[in-house]
Every structure is written in structure tokens, then in C-alpha cells.
Image: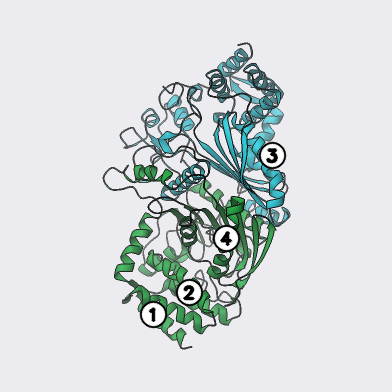
Chain colours: A green, B cyan
Amino acid sequence: MMEDRPVSTPNPLGQPLEKPVRLPVAELRDLAERALRSAGVPVKGARWQADLLIDAELKGQPSHGLLRLPRLVRRIRAGVADPETTGTHTWIGQALLQVEGGQGLGPVVARTALDVVQERVHETGIAAASIASANHLGMLAWYAEHVAKRGLVCLAMTTSEALVHPYGGRRALIGTNPIAVGVPAEPEPFVLDMATSQISMGKVHAHALREEPLEPGWALDADGEPTVDPLRAKEGALAPFGGAKGYGLGLAIELMVASLTGTALGTGITGTLDSVHPATKGDLFVLLRPAVVPGHLTDYLTEIRDSGPDRAVLVPGDRARECRSRALANGVELPTALVAELRALDHA
Amino acid sequence: MMEDRPVSTPNPLGQPLEKPVRLPVAELRDLAERALRSAGVPVKGARWQADLLIDAELKGQPSHGLLRLPRLVRRIRAGVADPETTGTHTWIGQALLQVEGGQGLGPVVARTALDVVQERVHETGIAAASIASANHLGMLAWYAEHVAKRGLVCLAMTTSEALVHPYGGRRALIGTNPIAVGVPAEPEPFVLDMATSQISMGKVHAHALREEPLEPGWALDADGEPTVDPLRAKEGALAPFGGAKGYGLGLAIELMVASLTGTALGTGITGTLDSVHPATKGDLFVLLRPAVVPGHLTDYLTEIRDSGPDRAVLVPGDRARECRSRALANGVELPTALVAELRALDHA
């Protein structure tokens, strides 16, 4: 039923990374945009969708990168992703934009909404977009950074398919529900983007491939018993990060998003890991106009970075920026099979 | 300098709990309101401040309860807490209320602001209050529940004095920065309220009193080395909860709040644990009008509660509600010395 859901079947997340091909970023972009164009995505939409997939590759997060593209093209061909729509907008209050995504591409629907909300927040001080029925948005960090670079604070959250067990529970009932925060700062904005699970299902698959055990406390098996066997964890549930608190945060995101968007909850959420079901998750973006100039935060962030015993303490976003700089200079490694698959899409 | 800061000196958090007195809730309220009235707090303000202190006692969180009252009265007498002001309001956008707290009582300033924002959100869909220079608000759970019971989603965060070290750092540079979320649900709203530290400094003091070691990973000493000695931890720093992710969340709260309110950051924050310094932290409340009726969430929360292997899985807010029910029936235990101190305040 969920043909390429990683819990049940092999999928690109599970592809061995032998013989990678290193490609310059311009070529990655060309590859992605061509594949999207050939599936009927208009020029601007292809560029916006490619931005998100490539940003994830640049930041060393391939699970949110180009390996999602073949699935997205299958979703378009299966009729559960609309390559053209930008969503339908309804202001249900002066500062709250309700977006019916119409199964559009996640980055296309979200960015169109954010452009409108960014305008509005100059009048209202705070404004939000609640998005239903859009496809996977990609890494929320992209949006948080995009908004923060325009001088606004961004708080973003999204629900996803149930892979996480409640603290004290045994079954997957909560999404990995990421939260992202962007705050204008100098020289670069603060960008936090984190899932509320202890680890990603992609990491479980990677351990399975390498036949490496998981760490204790990361996952339960299908019977709800703790396991370090990645093959058993794939059929089970991931732990929330940080025990009861991380569980509370993940559940709060599930409820806030569903409450604002009217989208599904828990095991009712589909469409981010398969090729055949509509996307029933929701997304929530809150934008705020800061009262201070970004420089107010600079000394503080410097104090934090300099507070380590021997090496610098990392501020969220630092590692991703370093990784991106290296990738822009040196290109990005992709699995050979994935490159071949992407090239074939262009000619399909 | 910070005469009753728990890091450096004995304080009510450290009082032994021998010989507690059990008092009915009406008597607690009378005690609190009389003490506040005698310090010059008007009737309504005394009631609102007492609401917050008593709510914490009812929920089994005495660190946010009446033990804070003698300090608050000292703050009023020292001129760093204004017993009368409700804060000054400026709409810096149609949906963003900037509140200059004028060193008013936290609950008085916050609740006055929330009343105004709750009105506004019916027009705007989302609205926020950013609060500077108010005294300690008490437990954010109270506000989240109060707002959610009125049919609105509430997201609240506040900064506090630096007690938490960055992940990979060695010194206390970040507040325990709590986040609270209230979401309308049936029969009771969802209420999450959590600090972003692994444990509270109150817990360190409690371990010190009982001469019990801390658990590994909870704290660093003044040299930045891991310690399980609560006396050494009192001079050091608390760990963020959940490793790098909890650190990221706590720091994001520090930055979002400072960015919106223009208040201090890190070690610049004073006035929540002492009697002599102005309160330089900030508070941020975001209210949202949900798109769905609370019943949408009920089945899901029931599914979570029923998903435990043998006993119910707790949803955030469940334990506090149970505790409150028992306290309303049976009264609340307070240290004898604290009751005597509160009674003396009334006659001071």
C-alpha cells in the first residue's frame, strides 16, 4: 500500500553509498530542474523545489535531498502531487493566512505563502501561514534562514508520518515533527532546525545497511520492546529526543499544527514517505518583526562560541553553513544509482 | 550582591521540609493576598499574583509557589518591583503588543496584556504580546491553560537568569528558558510547560539538603567539569535537556525573546532570583485562533493515553491536574518556617 515507505520496503534511503559521483552544484541543479520540468512542473516551481533539495545536499542532509526527487516525480505521475498549483489563500484574520495546498509541491506552496505573509507582517508585527495538503516541504532550515535574512524572526513547525512513540508508550503515534527557528543576527542569522525524535529513520536504515547496532534507548521493535537491532527498529518506533520533554514538545507540535490547519493527527498522516497517498500533514509558519537590530545578539553569540574548553562551541546553523561552503567549493557526492535515476527521469 | 540567589547563598529553595503544615487552599490564598496587600499591592493585583503562586503549590511545584512571596515583598520594599503598575501598552503592529512592564508584578503585567491580546486575536487570527521589565511570571502553565480554556492556542516563552551551559560549553550562559504550549482539547486542554534545562536549580538544592548525589550528566562545577556533587553544581551550571537539541531550543528561546522584547541576554539577565536587581528578562506570548473544534484532538489524545503497556501514558498536563485535584480536596503542605514568614509579612 505504501510502496516506498522505508518502514516496510527498500527505498532510496536504503541505497548503499558505494561509488559516489561528485558533481558541481550547478550540475545538481540542472539535473533536478530537468527532472521536475519533464514531470510537468513550471520553470519557477522547478527552481523553488530544486532549491530545497539542493540546500539539503549542501548542508550534508541527503535524506532531505535529491533522493526524494524520484519519489516526488512518482507522486506527480500518480496524481497525488499537483505540479502546478501554488495553493489557495484565505485570510481568516488580518494576520492569519489559511493555505489550502491542493497537493501542490511543498516548497512552491510554502514559499508563495511566505512571500505574502512577509508583506503582511510589516503592518501586523506578527503574522502566520497555516498550510494544509501540501507535499513535503524539505528542510525547514531553508525557510527559517530565508525569512531571518529578510530581518524577521521565523518559527516553523510541521507534522509528519507517525514514527515516534510517546514517552512511556510502545507504538509509533507521533511524527518526527521538526521545529525550526530563524532569528536575524550578524554576520549570519541564527538557524535551528531539529526533529523531535532522538534519531531519524534514515539513520536506522544507514545502521541496517552497515549491519551496525543502534545505541540503547534509540528505538523500540514492533512489539514495543527496546531494541538495538536496526532491522527490528525499522518495524517499530523511534524514541523522542530528551525523554519526557522531547515527547511533550513533539506532541505539542502535532497538536498546534493540527489545531491551526485542521490536518490529520498521528497514524492518520500519510504522503511524505510514499508515492500513492495524498499529503495529509500540516505546516505552520509564524513570522515576527523584531524590536531590536540583529547586532544586539552578536556579542552574545560570540560569547557562546568562545566558551568552549578547547574548540569553539557550535551555535545551531554553524555546522550547516560550514558544510555548505565546502560543498559549494568542491561539489556534492551522490550515489551513482541515484544520478542515473535522476538522468533517466529527464528522458522519461 | 545577589543576596538570595540560590547559586551563592542559602534561600527559601533550600529550606528543609521538616514539619510541614497542611493548609486548606482558601487559607493559602488568604495568607498570600494579605502579605501582598500589606506590601501595597492593590486588591486585583494581589489576587492575580496569588493565583500564580497558589497554582504552582496545587500542581506540586513549590519552587514556583509561595516560597517566592517573601522575596517578592522584599523586591517591592527595595523598589525593584512596582506593586501597582499593569504595564504600558504600545501596538507596534495590528497584532503585536509591546509591553513595557515598568517592573510590575509578573502576573499582573502578563494577564493585563493577555486580556488585550485575546480580544485582538478574534480580528487578527494570531496576535502576540512581547513583555519587557516585568517581574517573574510564575509557571507559564497557568497562562497556557487560561488561554486554551478560552478556545485559543497559546505559545509562551520566557528568559531567565543564566544557569545552563551550552552543549559542548562549560559555563552557564543560557537561562532555563521555559516554553509552554496550550491547545484547546476536550475534556481538558493540552498544557505543556517545561524548562529547557535537564533539571532545575531547585532540584540541585534539594539533593544538597538530602546529601544525595546528582545523576551523571546533570551539571558541571565552577571549573566546567562534570560533577555529581550538588554543592559543586550550585556554583556551576546545569545541563540543557536532551543534549544538542535541548541546547538549541533553549538558545532559540533566549534569542527570540530578546529579539522581540529588546531585553537582556545570558549573564545580563537579573531579577528573578534576587531581591535587589531590576528584572531584565523578557516574555513572549503568541495566541492563535484554531481552525478546528477541540474535539478534533480528543480521540488522538485518548489513543496516546491508552497506548501504554500496562498503565496509562501521560499527556503533558495530566499529572499537574491530578495533583491539583488532590490538593483542592486535601490542602497543601508548606514548611512551617515559610508559613510563619508569610504570617509575619502581613503584620510587617
Q: Amino acid at mark 1?
A: Val
Residue B134 vertical position relative to residue A23 in the rendered view, above or below: above
Check if mark 1's residue and mark 2's residue have beta carbons within 8 Å.
no
Q: Quadrant of the N terminus of chain A?
A: bottom right
> Dot 2: what SS?
helix
- Looking at the rendered structure, whether the residues under marks 4 and 1 are on a common chain is answered as yes
Determine if residue B181 is in view: no
- For mark 4, does the 10 Å Cα neighbourhood hold few (<14), some (14 to 19), or many (20 or more) residues? many
Tell me, for residue A47, which label it has, or none. 2
Q: What residue does disc 4 label?
A: A159
Side (left or right) of B200 relative to B296: left
- Looking at the rendered structure, whether the residues under marks 3 and 4 are on a common chain is answered as no
Q: Amino acid at mark 3?
A: Asp
Task: Indicate the quadrant where residue A161 lies.
Answer: bottom right
Task: Indicate the quadrant where residue B148 lies.
Answer: top right
Disc 3 versus disc 4: distance between alpha carbons? Answer: 30 Å
Q: Mark 4 or mark 2: which comes first in sequence?
A: 2
Which of the two marks, 3 or 1, is nearer to us in this view? 3
Q: Which residue of the protein is positioned furthest toward the bottom in this rendering?
A: A347
Q: Chain of mark 2?
A: A
Q: Chain of mark 1?
A: A
Determine if residue A86 is in view: yes
Q: What residue does disc 1 label?
A: A339
Q: What residue does disc 3 label?
A: B115
